[in-house]
Amino acid sequence: MALDGVDTHFDYTLIDCQPSVFHLTQMALAASHDVVIVTEADIYSVEAAKHVYEFVVQRAPRDLANPTLAVRGVVVNALTTTALQAEQRDSIRQIFGHLVWEPAIESRTTLAEANTDMLPLTEIRTTEPRAMYELLSQSFLKAVPA
């Protein structure tokens, strides 16, 4: 009811929440139609993602009076090229299966490293992230109906 009339001119309204599943996140879930879980490839983030998934599947229909709420995708964020991160990424794929969207979002440290690199921020120093976000947008549009 809180969003009635507020977002009628938009195809999508994105609500960004902490994965805590505390009351503010629960209110956002109650007002939502679909959920996209964003997680990092580390054990604590994966556990939080599992907790959010289980909450949506098991408790949202009863506790939030939102029986149609569904997890539509899982996005891996801030991925680095370490072996441990690759292992955790594979674990996320095993846990969530077809819900995992590709590609994973690579860690971007442009701002943090700009001072030591002595390059302007406009200088391309990493692979172009635009294509990565375009692919994720396509996954979003396929998974979440307008």
Image: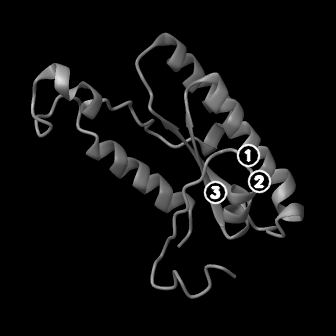
Secondary element under disc 1, as helix, strand or loop, is helix
Left or right: 42 with respect to 118? right
Q: Are marks 1 and 2 in contact (CB under 8 Å)?
A: yes
Taking depth in this image into account, of 66 and 27 the one nearest to the observer is 27
For badge 1, the amino acid type reads Tyr
Crowd tier of the residue under label 1, counting other residues whose Cα lies within 10 Å: few below 14, some 14–19, many 20 or above:
many
Give me the residue at 64% from left, 62% from top: 34
**Where is residue 11 shown, x and y percent of the image?**
48, 76
Residue 35, disc: 3
Which of disc 3 and disc 2 is earlier in sequence? 3
Q: In this image, 51 relative to 3: left or right?
A: right
Please report contact status of discs 2 and 3: CB closer than 8 Å, yes or no.
Answer: yes
* Separation of marks 1 and 2 at Cα, in angstroms: 5 Å
Q: Secondary structure at mark 2?
A: helix
List the residue tagged with mark 1.
Answer: 53
Tag 3: residue type?
Val
